[in-house]
Image (cartoon, coloured by chain):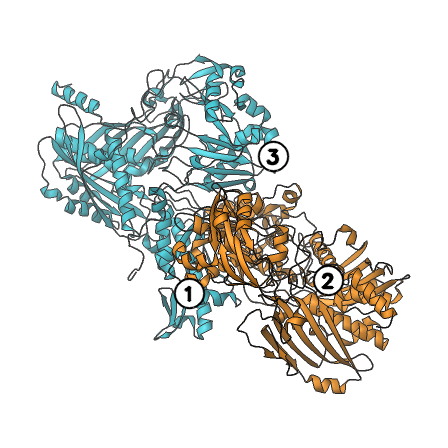
Chain colours: A cyan, B orange
Amino acid sequence: MGEFKVIGKGVVRTDAVDKVTGRAIYTVDLTLPRMIYGAFVRSPYAHARIKRIDASKAWKVPGVVAIITQEQLSKDYALVVEEEVHAAERVRRLLAGDKVRYYGEKVALVGAETLEAAKEAASLVEVEYEPLPAVTDLREAVKEGAPLIWEDREPVQGPNGELLYNVVSESHHQEGDVEQGFAESDYIFEDEFYVHRVHQTYLEPQATIASVDEKGKITVWTSTQGIFAVRSNIARSLGIPLSRINVIGMTIGGGFGGKYGGITDVYAVILSLFTHRPVKIVYNREEEFLDANPAPGLYVRIKTGVKKDGTLVARYVYALWNVGVGGGASWATGAFARLYKVPHIKWDAYEVATNTPPVGAYRAPGYPQIIFAGETQLNRIAMELEIDPVELRLRNLRDEPGFRETLMVVVEKSDWFNKEKGENEGWGIAMGWWQNASSPAAVFVSVHEDGSVKVFCGMMDITGSETGISQVVAETLGVNYEDVTFVRGDTDSSPFSPPSGGSTITFSVGSAAKRAAEDALRQILEVAAKQLDVKVEDLEWGNKRVWVKGDPERSLSYAEIARAAMRTSSGPIVGKGTFGADPSDVATFAQAVKVRVDEETGEITVIKSVQALDVGRVVNPILCEGQVEGAITQSISWGTMEEMKYDASGAMVNPNLGDYQIPTIADVPSQVEISLLEFPSRHGPYGVKGIGEPPITAGLAAVVSAVADATKLWMHEVPVTPERLILSMERSKVGV
Amino acid sequence: MGEFKVIGKGVVRTDAVDKVTGRAIYTVDLTLPRMIYGAFVRSPYAHARIKRIDASKAWKVPGVVAIITQEQLSKDYALVVEEEVHAAERVRRLLAGDKVRYYGEKVALVGAETLEAAKEAASLVEVEYEPLPAVTDLREAVKEGAPLIWEDREPVQGPNGELLYNVVSESHHQEGDVEQGFAESDYIFEDEFYVHRVHQTYLEPQATIASVDEKGKITVWTSTQGIFAVRSNIARSLGIPLSRINVIGMTIGGGFGGKYGGITDVYAVILSLFTHRPVKIVYNREEEFLDANPAPGLYVRIKTGVKKDGTLVARYVYALWNVGVGGGASWATGAFARLYKVPHIKWDAYEVATNTPPVGAYRAPGYPQIIFAGETQLNRIAMELEIDPVELRLRNLRDEPGFRETLMVVVEKSDWFNKEKGENEGWGIAMGWWQNASSPAAVFVSVHEDGSVKVFCGMMDITGSETGISQVVAETLGVNYEDVTFVRGDTDSSPFSPPSGGSTITFSVGSAAKRAAEDALRQILEVAAKQLDVKVEDLEWGNKRVWVKGDPERSLSYAEIARAAMRTSSGPIVGKGTFGADPSDVATFAQAVKVRVDEETGEITVIKSVQALDVGRVVNPILCEGQVEGAITQSISWGTMEEMKYDASGAMVNPNLGDYQIPTIADVPSQVEISLLEFPSRHGPYGVKGIGEPPITAGLAAVVSAVADATKLWMHEVPVTPERLILSMERSKVGV
């Protein structure tokens, strides 16, 4: 690739100043004239029949503008939307109809002049329920006799012929013949693991403002990872043509997969359609926990056959994913199998409905859960076979670019083979991976009359993507980072951009941006060649200038070229780049952690975390490290503290940040060491791979394995809270 | 070109509903938080020295935030703008410094919490003046002894060696040898004409809101014909980099050449830089007349040599353009010579400064004035030689596409050779022309997942350009007009677009849009070919579908293709089109009018106006006719009523719509007949020529010639007001 001028530099993020000074405008900061506020009536039952809804008292609250139930929605929606679609069909199940299926489910939507009035009215809507038995734990949900979430759904047959209830989807996969593999193995290991549901706990709750104008045009200001995803979801949910909807992405305060839309946006649009008023709906934290789209829980049985020398022969996974009342997860099941050469692989995965909110994506969706099982078991095998877990991995890792190197950097930086530990301390190591999504994207790049550059697209910037892509454009065009301004359009103005998730952005939008910059550069060189009366091949460029090879005095600035272009047939210098389905390559991640366990309290402290990530190409080291720091913090807290808890009735017992623990700075390991490797991907700009997800995928296994190293106890349920650990330690002492 | 599906249809304008229902948002409708209002202190003298400015009383008005004079601007500007430029140099002359040079010139800028406070404070700023003699008539301004507008400017030598004072610019042109031509002629005709200055009188006065944020980014909401023109003018005037400025075009209530920026926008930016507040400045009608940029006045002597049979041999023009204190005009002088074969042509043109506001563009800048002289004289020659004016023109017209045909359609539709007239009635005919500007432009076209189409650019729509260009895109892509949404960006987001002036838009932006649509179509066909497993050449398309030639059942909708593209290497369907300097061709215009003259009052009534315009290609007949109707109304009123009048001291005496007459519906001819011809231009989309300007170019001559036909009086000064006509009739009766 030669020398980079802008790529690889730790330039300051485009949004840094706005965010640290509080100038950034979030959805909640916006107020429109005549705006009303939306609030929800929510179910106090996890499972119940709705017998009757009486809004008469609620209507008496001053300032109430609308109270919408599913009955009214089904009846009147076609009228208010003024579209010739089967609108009433579309809006089914946006609110609870004759049944509620989880605690906190939306039963009615209230709009009022003030948020206080909306909430008061919501609290006065009388709903008569007939409570039903509920189930929130998927291990119970699959059993005969469990409450059925979807009444008409028949049980499916499990791998051993048993009936599995509440299964809404299943997927199966086989390579080789695992039965033969197990027969050929010297040892068979079988483990079961259970991972609780966690919430993405983005700082900024879900928030939307929607406004329908007199012509029926719908404008949506929202906190989302993808404006086009929000647009198409509203269109699909509400039966409205795309061209009637414009989505404007506001500054987003985190998403982690939880902000693809549908939680507040659709309801703000409905309320605006019914009231002809702009509508603001902002979740509070309790609503986030009760009724957003957290990560799925996982129950997994994993069976592995190995040779005496540690060679993996066969692995089988039986996975149950807790998807609540909707969403998908089972496609992630195969993630445990990607890194290692295993001749015989099989899995059976089932998505199980429970009386809990629907699931969504959370950073490397499903990977932390399933990789936790696979990697933890590998470490247990290593311990049992008395093979170092690094040796075990080296023996089995696939021979692909970066796989071994990523692990070996962690070995070196942690001094793994000479690692020290004190009393109650232990080390764990694990690997993870992600292959970033490859998403359709388009970008425009304009070079203005002063040589300054504008990048225009419809991408949301959560983690510094605008910064990284500006660096890609600057590098490609031969200008400085400071010369590039990144401009985000709305869905009306900008070309298609994918949601910022799946680590896709710098790869996909970055590729489109690089092509747009190359297109602009091509025009620059063509105009310059004409102006300088040479061939394009005779030109060199850099630092916002083009010159004749070997005669640098014969040169033009980009500003001069941009102005000259205006006077020729060329016209303005504008580049277009599109990117489609060209895939990325695996980004491997390895992490070694050292923990200290408090024998009295069961508290786990991660003292040190050493990790390496193959990023393909370091566009901005500060941003790369930031991604890793954030992800390991999340995986460590998932492994030790985060858990959505439900009582026997199905009510969530910790829907707040007092009872649902998220990490503070005190929970971040005091020693964090990050190494970035560069094994370029085929299609990413300058070899970039997506890096948001991989560093969350190894932490659970590393922490649980370190705890085992410290305590000789293999914990099979995460988070390993102090309670769980103490209980296990006590059980092991008494030999239970 | 084959059959058109969308081109040529009179579809409803994209902005029609918003405008007729009052929903359209103009700059004046916008209010920002913390916004202050700007008002100007204006000179009560046309020419004076400023001795002293005392703002102490003005500062006492409650709510005053800033009072800025040129002295303060020069001193403090570099500080407030925070740019390393010679900022103080840049801002010279934005306000009057030691001298005022026209009545109403800006002397100070006041910002206050309310408009009332700003105006009150402005009225309390005490300025001590030393009045100087002033000159507003250019015929006086060139004479020795005239007040000098720019003190240090030396007189120039006129064509006969005489000294011409106050000349700020001159241009000369010669083809053949006019002296020889006159010698070879049978007759020589010499006339002088005088055209008064007129104002564009757009309905919406100049208006801008500017806001500078904490990072120094300047956002400008403004009523303009071109957002990029406004941006570059602010950048140049104030020494600010382009990337620090974002210009948002609001709905514009007319421009006619008068809204290229610099009148309110620069001052709103200055006031915002000084106060860190958003600033609104909206002109009132008086300010429009006193201090905007009206059309230049013209004094012309024209000398023509002809053969007995009417063949033109030589023409010479001596032109003085009244440009007030700035602006240009003389480049239009040659317009009289374009339509006819004249072997010997020469002109000498001078721009003359007077104590009047600077000039700007007004619909076909300079053409109505100079063509008035050329065409009126042709009609006088025809009358003197007793040759029909149509015959005279046919004998001399160049043999170029559309030249004769345009004239002959008018001849036919007016039944020219059998035309009837009653007492005090007369007919006049004239030709005019315009070759539209060819401007750099870029457009993006996106095809969304439902097959709907978005056109994105930075063009301002005044006269239905979005509608026409949407038709071009729809035609090119094979979709319906209703499938296309036109989206205007700001200067930060959109690629470069030229100002909407010079009839350039449908030609230049339309060409870029057509190319963008072709680029998108190419992608559509490539994706479809892959999906249908055929070659692109085997495909046909239309009505939002692509099918295999001869096998129309094998087809895909654009929606299916757009979605398929997302899943392939192609990526989203987005087209880019740029357009540069490829020229258009002459659009000829011919107009015959019938007038009735009231002998008692001198009032001229245009009874009938028959005209033909070569539009190249009729994209939308309603819009084409609208352009012609508007333009002929303006030229008739320029010929009969519009005039900016000044008294001996240089004060404008009619700066309001009571005293400055503009046409009402009663002044529009009761019979208007419009024919559209199609002689396609080389580079316009589907042959389009720009049509905004040409239909204003012939009316002055047609009306004045019709008056001559009715009264036998050749009027040489326009407007031919009742006063002027009565005076001339009386003079002719007494033989003066």
Nearer the camera: disc 2 or disc 3: 2
Residue at 65% over, 72% down: B320
Instruction: Say which mark, if any, is on residue B613.
Output: 2
* Callout 2 secondary element: strand
Whether the residues at callouts 3 and 1 have beta carbons within 8 Å, the answer is no
Residue at 35% over, 59% down: A480
* Frontmost residue, A450 versus B727: B727
* Frontmost residue, B343 versus B161: B161
> Disc 3 designates what residue?
A83
Kindly give the residue lying farthest to the right in the view shown: B423
Whether the residues at callouts 2 and 1 have beta carbons within 8 Å, the answer is no
Nearer the camera: disc 3 or disc 1: 1
Badge 2 amino acid: Leu
User: Which quarter of the picture shows residue A199?
Assistant: top left
**Does the rendering let one see residue A142?**
no
The mark nearer the N terminus, 3 or 1, is 3
**Distance CA(mark 2)–CA(mark 1):** 42 Å
